[in-house]
Amino acid sequence: MLFTSSAPYGTHQTTDYNSYTMDHSNKIVEIRNGGRFNQSIILKYKDDTEWVFLNNKQEERFCGFLYLQKALEESNLNTIQAAENKIAIHDRKIIYLSRWHGDKKPDVSETSGYSKELSTLEQDIGFTDMPGNANLRKKDNIIYVFDTEKHSFSKGVHEKIDSFVHQHKAIRSILEESLKD
């Protein structure tokens, strides 16, 4: 299903909501603890993908992800990507997920090869929550950025993040409608 949204940041855009929702036929096959200090809940789906269950500030993180995804695309940074986020239904409840890319943080020697891109991420895009590469993961020569709540960004981009609230609500409303069936 496609829908069009408009917001102060960017232009009207058509979004395929399927890109941001988990396919209903893709069921959870395993639940485990993982991540930093084993505090995250990792959900493994039938398609072998793993996702972190976002248990707080879900909507804020989702809007931050939408902003980050668009900003990275506009900056043409191919070696840095937003960790994919999706909204799903589990046990007749709407849940929020962030794609799990493992525990491998890029080390200092690896990030020096990405210094221009990381500088763009911080200076131009406003993602500032990178001390110790805590919210970065490296997999297949791509650095994935996660933990996209507002405080992970400079205050100068908070309004841009808020401009994605309408798109988030449109995506969520489609799932809410499916729960009525």
Image: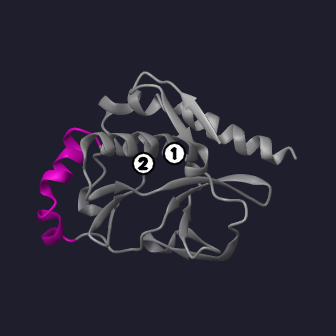
Front-most of residues 129 and 17: 17
The residue at 39%/29% (across/down) is 160
Query: Magenta residues?
Result: 107-126
Find residue 6 and report its horizontal and vertical position in percent.
Answer: 50, 24
Find residue 59 and report its horizontal and vertical position in percent.
Answer: 56, 42
In this image, 60 relative to 180: left or right? left
Find residue 108 and report its horizontal and vertical position in percent.
Answer: 16, 68
The residue at 54%/39% (across/down) is 15
Task: Give the number of the disc on residue 148.
Answer: 2
Front-most of residues 105 and 15: 15
Instruction: Identify the image quadrant of the N terminus.
Output: top right
Location of mark 1 (residue): 62
**Is residue 132 within the magenta segment?**
no
- Residue 110 sits in which quadrant? bottom left
Determine whether 101 is above or below 89 in the image: below
CA neighbours of label 1 inside 10 A, class few (<14), some (14 to 19), many (20+): many
Q: Amino acid at mark 2?
A: Thr
Magenta segment main secondary structure = helix
CA neighbours of label 2 inside 10 A, class few (<14), some (14 to 19), many (20+): many
The residue at 55%/51% (across/down) is 19
Residues under numbered marks 2 and 1 in contact, where contact means CB atoms less than 8 Å apart? yes
The residue at 75%/53% (across/down) is 93
User: What scheme was used to colour the molecule?
Assistant: one colour
Find residue 53 and report its horizontal and vertical position in percent.
Answer: 58, 61
Q: Amino acid at mark 1?
A: Phe
Determine whether 40 is above or below 92 in the image: below
Secondary structure category for the residue under label 2: loop
State which tag comes first along the sequence, 2 or 1: 1
